[in-house]
Image: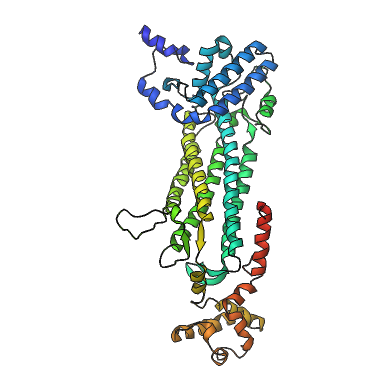
Amino acid sequence: MSEEKESGSKKLWGGRFSTATAGSVEAFTASIHYDVRLYKYDIAGSKAHATMLASQGILSSEELAAIVGGLTAIEQEIDAGTFEFRRELEDIHMNIEKALVDRIGPAGAKLHSARSRNDQIALDLKMYLRDQCDILTELLVEIRKAFVLLAREYLGRVMPGYTHMQRAQPVLISHHMLAYYEMFGRDLSRLADCRKRLNLSPLGCAAMAGTGLPIDREQVAAALGFDGVTANSMDTVGDRDFAIEFVSCCTLTQLHLSRLSEELVLWSTQEFSFVDIADAFCTGSSIMPQKKNPDIPELIRGKSGRVVGSLMALITLVKGLPLTYNRDLQEDKEPVFDAVDTVSASLAIMAELLKNLRFRTDRMADATRFGCMTATDLADYLVLKDIPFREAHGIVGRAVAYCLGKGCELEALSLDELAQFSPVIKKDVFEVLHVEGSVNSRISTGGTGLQRVEEAVSYAEKQMGIA
Ligand code: ARG
């Protein structure tokens, strides 16, 4: 019994407990095996907090020096891998605090004044996610550059554009690449938004009601690079909106990667043969010697399930939570970390793959020659001859049916054949019936016309600081 009491009171919170925590409970409640990832933020937060406590007269300057020195030494040990983490100390906060007390004595025990692990974990996670926003931003810039390089390299080359996975209208390969450039651009702006919204310091909200000690939250916030402080202590310690927002940014990015992956898998089939993914970015089959498999896009597509799963986990986590902090919130970290790892690894490898991607422009151009892909152009031609679009649609539909029966393309019909569908069809129709004419006519803003796409590539190059 006395042994148990001793063991129970070894906890930083052990005072009111008469028996030791069961080993199974320690194992179940511990988070140190994953929240160790936050140690640098925890230490930076503690140093800023201690500095503020000293300027408020709550710590002496000697105590502050001892705390800062102790925390620096602990950080070096963790960096070096020599720090001994203890599961019975639950989490990163208490592992560090206990080590500090062991190292510097009573001054260390003063550090937690006017602070709770509830505002501390919110701080650590926000600081971590702020950095992750910056890291993902760099990765997104890299992948966008890869699309711009491809768009420049293949400028003027045509491919089929699809709707419903049916050949629809010919487009420029560059236009297709810049579609992804736009998608990842939205991801960037969403991340910037997320970073801005999360960048308010939670420290000083303490357990949930604030503190009676004379603290200066603004000082801590400024020292840690926050734009200000949060407004309501109860909201602050129970808020994980920022984590959900961050993971939803990750989810959209991963979905964009997944859609791209689907296209790459499809395009590298023998049926399409639109792209060659470099050998270094493919794998082989253990049984079929001829195989070259697009495992990277397949895995990225597969991993999107994990990121969506992380988002679902976080959303469900907060769904039924009353204010304020509840231990459930400890479950936020693994989904967040998994989303970070998955999205950053996927972005990095995809950017590399894109830099080593070759389009088979001959195959892509050939594919635009079949399927009456200039039918809309013929309809537009009729519209310009004052035929109402719906009527034009019907005329062209009949012409397409005629081609299908004959087994040829619109472009292959003679003027007499075409004119039987409408008397307004004249010789100049052939200018719109060939693929290049079709593509180049689409110069509406945002369209695939060469002139527009050239402008878009140059603009993107400027944005990305290329050439
Ligand atoms: N490990 C905890 C978490 O991740 C830290 C906060 C714990 N607070 C508490 N009062 N038990 O949420």
Number of marks drawn = 0
Q: In which quarter of the image is residue 416?
A: bottom right
Position of residue 167 measured from the top left corner of the image (x, y, whole percent): 49, 71
Task: Point out the residue furthest to the top here.
Answer: 2
Q: Is residue 225 above or below residue 389?
A: above
Q: In this view, does 72 lie above or below 234?
A: above
Position of residue 52 measured from the top left corner of the image (x, y, whole percent): 67, 20
Is residue 166 visible to the viewer in this orientation of the structure? yes
Residue in the image at 50% along x and 69% along y: 364
Residue in the image at 39% along x and 58% along y: 292
Closer to the camera in the image, 98 or 141: 141
Is residue 113 visible to the viewer in this orientation of the structure? no
| Quadrant containing the C terminus in the rendered view | bottom right
Closer to the camera in the image, 310 or 268: 268
Colouring: rainbow
Q: Quadrant of residue 443?
A: bottom right
| Quadrant containing the N terminus in the rendered view | top left
Q: In this view, does 197 lie to the left or right of 38?
A: right
Position of residue 456 measured from the top left corner of the image (x, y, whole percent): 66, 61
Closer to the camera in the image, 114 or 463: 463
Q: In which quarter of the image is residue 111?
A: top right
Residue in the image at 64% along x and 23% along y: 48
Position of residue 107 measured from the top left corner of the image (x, y, whole percent): 59, 11
Closer to the camera in the image, 376 or 386: 376
Q: In this view, does 24 lie to the left or right of 338?
A: left
